[in-house]
Image (cartoon, grey):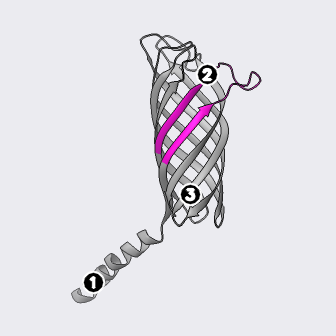
Amino acid sequence: MRSMRIAALAAAFAVLPLAVGFARGAGGFTWGQQIFDPQLANLDMQSSLVGVYGYGVSWRGQRTGGFALAVHSDGATPVVEGGFIGGIAGQEFRRSPFIGAVNLWAGMGGLTAGRGVPPEGSFAVFGEITAELGAAFMPGVMLTGYAGLQAMSAVSSGEAFFTRVMYTPVIGMRLAWGS
């Protein structure tokens, strides 16, 4: 009886690497640029975003993962700099080699110096909803473009939570490795 348990446990551990081999997901680099449109934005920050991310994908195409982003204004007034970490949730659609997805990135971090941000900096929240389209141009390497709406809010003591919301359209590219 004990030898059957040991054999079953050994078989389970032998199958575990195969499960990882068939898992789906990706990770890589992201770059984005805020675009000012007076009808869709409340502030012209001209900020660019760079970061890293990773996510897993269920067999139904549901994405879950995490990211880290750095924000920097490109000489615009106001200059805004900061960074965020957070989570990714989304839905992916694949028709090899093409991929499409709708994503929500939400997180927290900090911002400094700019209109709507105290000069000493502030705790901040971040949200971005995007549509993403792309293709695998090599096995395991995907290049996608995305567009959507991004919002950041500096959070200071003594104020309502979202009194300093800055929102704007965003476009960008993502390079990912995975399946």
Task: Point out the frontmost of discs 1 and 3.
Answer: 3
The residue drawn where x is 50% and y is 19% is: 155
Q: Is residue 55 visible?
A: no
Query: Which marked residue is nearer to the observer: mark 1 or mark 2?
Result: 2
Residue 172 at x, y = what percent?
61, 40
Residue 94 horizontal/vertical position (percent): 65, 63
Mark toward the viewer: 3 or 2: 3
Q: Disc 1 and disc 3: Cα gap in Å? A: 43 Å
Identify the amino acid type marked 1: Arg
Tell me the residue that label 2 is attached to. 166
Farthest left residue? 2
Local packing at callout 3 (Cα closer than 10 Å; few below 14, some 14-19, many 20+) is: many
Residue 5, disc: 1
The residue closer to the viewer here, 76 or 123, is 76
Q: Which residues are drawn in magenta?
A: 29-52
Q: Residues within 10 Å of mark 2 (few under 14, many from 20)?
A: many
- Check disc 3 and give the amino acid type: Met
Residue that mark 3 sits on: 142
First reached walking from the N terminus: tag 1 or tag 2: 1
